Amino acid sequence: MASNPEKDEAAARFAEAKGDIDERKLEVQVAQLQEDLRGIADTLKHLTGERVSGAQRSASAEFRNFQRRATNSINDTIEDIEDQASELELELKDRIREKPFASVFAALGIGYLLALISRH
């Protein structure tokens, strides 16, 4: 059977046209895929931003909580020290009232010792 050149040429043009159509379809699919990937990247960026913001808010709240507890603890300690100092002051005043001469001599002795120490 002899080959028909017109049929061969038509088949070649058909194959070429089909290849062009397939190439265009592939280009459209690649473009769509690129758009989908951009959308996924934007969504991930948004989700990551939300998580970072949430972590920042949480860390800020924890810091304020820690700061409040530390301030309360320091204030409680200061109050305890002030109470102890007041108690010592009252005890010292009571002892001075009970033994005024001994207290004066003790104060003079302590003053003398401090003077000696400060000279050296």
Image (cartoon, rainbow, N blue to C red):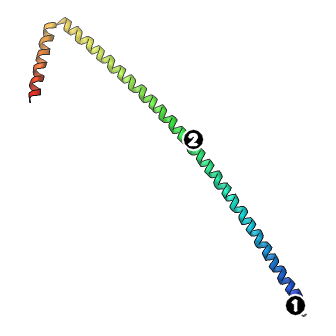
How many badges with numbers are in the image? 2
Q: Amino acid at mark 2?
A: Gly
Work out which quarter of the rendered image holds the C terminus and state it.
top left
x and y percentages locating residue 2 in the rendered image:
90, 94
In the rendered structure, the answer to whether residue 116 lies left or right of residue 94 reads left
- Residue 41 in the image: above or below residue 113: below
Task: Report the Cα–Cα distance between label 1 and label 2.
Answer: 73 Å
Residue at point 33% right, 18% down?
Answer: 82
**Residue 5, disc:** 1
**What x and y, as percent, mark residue 91?**
25, 11
Left or right position of 49 against 84: right
Q: Quadrant of residue 67?
A: top left
* Residue 28 image position (x, y, % from top left): 75, 66
Crowding at mark 2 (Cα within 10 Å: few <14, some 14-19, many 20+): few
Q: In the displayed structure, would residue 37 be above or below residue 46? A: below
Give coordinates of residue 55: x percent, y percent.
Answer: 54, 42
- Which residue: 13% across, 10% down? 102
Q: Secondary structure at mark 2?
A: helix
Rendering quarter of residue 117: top left
Q: In the rendered structure, which disc, 1 or 2, sits on the residue that comes first in sequence?
A: 1
Q: Check the image and name the residue furthest to the top.
A: 98
- Disc 2: which residue: 54
What residue sits 54% from the left and 38% below the top? 57
95 left or right of 113 in image:
right
| Residue sitting at x 78%, y 76% | 19
Type of amino acid at the residue the image marks with label 1 = Pro
Name the image quarter holding the N terminus.
bottom right
In the depicted view, which residue is nearer to us: 14 or 79?
A: 14
Q: Nearer the viewer, residue 25 or 92?
A: 25
Q: Residues within 10 Å of mark 1 (few under 14, many from 20)?
A: few
